[in-house]
C-alpha cells in the first residue's frame, strides 16, 4: 500500500518540489492537501492512516490532534520554529518532529548586513532630501564612521549569527559576540571576540539580535540594556520580535539614547496599523521578509519533504528535535 502524506499549508502557490521528491521516493504515494482554514475539518478523514505530515509553522499540532495520528511516523515543519507542535505528545506516540534549520541562513544574514549598510549610508533619506537639500558635502548633516572601522556585537552565535560574523569580518568590521553557550575556543576559531553583554553593548556601533526565543530570551532587550549602547549605535533584529520590549525601544530612540533600529520581526505579527513601532522616526520596520528568496523557499519545500521521506524510509532525520 502506498505511503500517505498530508501537506497542510496556505502559503505556497504550488507543491511541485515536494511532489517530485515524494514521488521519486515512493511512486505510488498519495499526497493530500489542506489549507490553514480547513485542515481541522479533515482530521477525522485523514489522520487515522496518514504516514507523514508536512505542515506550515503556524499550524497547531496539539495533543488532541496528534493522538489521532495512528500511523504517522513524522511531523515535518516548514521552517525553523516548531513551537506550535506538542513535541511531548508526538514523542509519546513515537512520532518524530523535525524542522528545517538551515534553509535561510544565508538570506537572514544578508539582511543583517543590508541593515548595517542601510543604517550607515541612509540612502533613502538622501534620495528624499536631494529634492530640496544642498548637493555634495553640504548635504551630509552628520558624518558617520566608516563601516570597516565599526564594531558589531552579535547576540546569539548560532548558524545565522556565525554567517553574519563571517560576512562582517569580510567587511573589516570588528566582531564581538555575546552567547553564554558558545566557548571562547569556538569564537576564536571564527575570528570573533567573546564578551560579556554589558561590555559588548558599550563597544558596539551595531547590535544584531540573533537569539532564539524562549523563556530566557523573552523581553531580553529592555530599556536598561539598550541604555548601555552608544548614542550613535543601531539595534538590528531579524530573529524573533519577542526578544525586544518594543515600548522600551521606542522610548530609547525617541530620547536619542540610541540612533535607531532596523527590525524585520515584531512581537505582534502582523502589527496593527497604529502600532507606534511603525511610526517612530529612525525605527525602520520590514514585514518579516529577511528569509525570503526564491532559493530559500525552494530549499525549504525540498528539505521539509526530504525529512518526511527519510523517516518513512527508516533513515535518520538529522534535524529531528525529539
Image: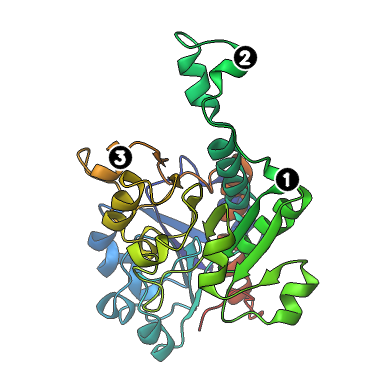
| Percent coordinates x, y for residue 191 in the rendering | 78, 66
Contact (Cβ within 8 Å) of mark 1 with mark 2:
no
| Percent coordinates x, y for residue 230 in the rendering | 50, 54
- Gap between marks 3 and 1, in whole Å? 30 Å
State which tag comes first along the sequence, 2 or 3: 2
- What numbered label is drawn on residue 136? 2
Q: Relative to the observer, which residue lies in front, 51 or 259? A: 259
Q: Relative to the observer, which residue lies in front, 51 or 117? A: 117
The local crowd at label 1, few if under 14, some if 14 to 19, many if 20 or more residues have their Cα within 10 Å, is few
Task: Tell me the SS state at disc 1.
Answer: helix
**In the rendered image, the vertical position of residue 321 relative to residue 135, given as above or below:** below
Task: Tell me: 64 left or right of 320.
Answer: left
Is residue 256 something one can see in this rendering? Answer: yes
Provide the residue designation for mark 1.
148
The local crowd at label 2, few if under 14, some if 14 to 19, many if 20 or more residues have their Cα within 10 Å, is few
- What numbered label is drawn on residue 278? 3
What residue do we see at 46% from left, 88% from top?
94
What residue do we see at 74% from left, 77% from top?
186
What residue do we see at 21% from left, 43% from top?
272
What residue do we see at 63% from left, 81% from top?
314
State which tag comes first along the sequence, 3 or 1: 1
- What numbered label is drawn on residue 64? none
**In the rendered image, the vertical position of residue 5 relative to residue 134, given as above or below:** below
Task: Tell me the SS state at disc 2.
Answer: helix
- Gap between marks 2 and 3, in whole Å? 31 Å
Task: Tell me: 197 left or right of 83.
Answer: right
Q: Quadrant of residue 160?
A: bottom right
Closer to us: mark 3 or mark 1? Answer: 1
The local crowd at label 3, few if under 14, some if 14 to 19, many if 20 or more residues have their Cα within 10 Å, is some
Applied colour scheme: rainbow
- Gap between marks 1 and 2, in whole Å? 22 Å
Amino acid at each position: 500500500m502506498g505511503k500517505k502524506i498530508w501537506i497542510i499549508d496556505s502559503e505556497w502557490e504550488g507543491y511541485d518540489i515536494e511532489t517530485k521528491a515524494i514521488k521519486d521516493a515512493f511512486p505510488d504515494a498519495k499526497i493530500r492537501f489542506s489549507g490553514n482554514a480547513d485542515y481541522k475539518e479533515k482530521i477525522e478523514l485523514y489522520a487515522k492512516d496518514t504516514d507523514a505530515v508536512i505542515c506550515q509553522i503556524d499550524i497547531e499540532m496539539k495533543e488532541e490532534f496528534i493522538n489521532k495520528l495512528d500511523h504517522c511516523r513524522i511531523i515535518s515543519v516548514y521552517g525553523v520554529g516548531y513551537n506550535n507542535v506538542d513535541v511531548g505528545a508526538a514523542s509519546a506516540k513515537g512520532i518524530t518532529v523535525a524542522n528545517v534549520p538551515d534553509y535561510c541562513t544565508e538570506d537572514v544574514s544578508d539582511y543583517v548586513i543590508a541593515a548595517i549598510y542601510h543604517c550607515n549610508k541612509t540612502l533613502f533619506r538622501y534620495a528624499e532630501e536631494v529634492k530640496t537639500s544642498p548637493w555634495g558635502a553640504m548635504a551630509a548633516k552628520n558624518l558617520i564612521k566608516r563601516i570597516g572601522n565599526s564594531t558589531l556585537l552579535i547576540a546569539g552565535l548560532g548558524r545565522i549569527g556565525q554567517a553574519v560574523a563571517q560576512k562582517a569580518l569580510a567587511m573589516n568590521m570588528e566582531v564581538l559576540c555575546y552567547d553564554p553557550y558558545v566557548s571562547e575556543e569556538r569564537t576564536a576559531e571564527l575570528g570573533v571576540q567573546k564578551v560579556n553583554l554589558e561590555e559588548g553593548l558599550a563597544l558596539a556601533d551595531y547590535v544584531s539580535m540573533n537569539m532564539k526565543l524562549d523563556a530566557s530570551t523573552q523581553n531580553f532587550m529592555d530599556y536598561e540594556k539598550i541604555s548601555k549602547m552608544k548614542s550613535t549605535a543601531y539595534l538590528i533584529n531579524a530573529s524573533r520580535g519577542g526578544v525586544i520590549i518594543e515600548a522600551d525601544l521606542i522610548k530609547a530612540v525617541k530620547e536619542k539614547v540610541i540612533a535607531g533600529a532596523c527590525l524585520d520581526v515584531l512581537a505582534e505579527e502582523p502589527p496593527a496599523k497604529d502600532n507606534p513601532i511603525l511610526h517612530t522616526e529612525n525605527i525602520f520596520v520590514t514585514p518579516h521578509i529577511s528569509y525570503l528568496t526564491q532559493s530559500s523557499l525552494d530549499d525549504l519545500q525540498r528539505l521539509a519533504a526530504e525529512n518526511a521521506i527519510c523517516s518513512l524510509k527508516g533513515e535518520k532525520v538529522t534535524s529531528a528535535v525529539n
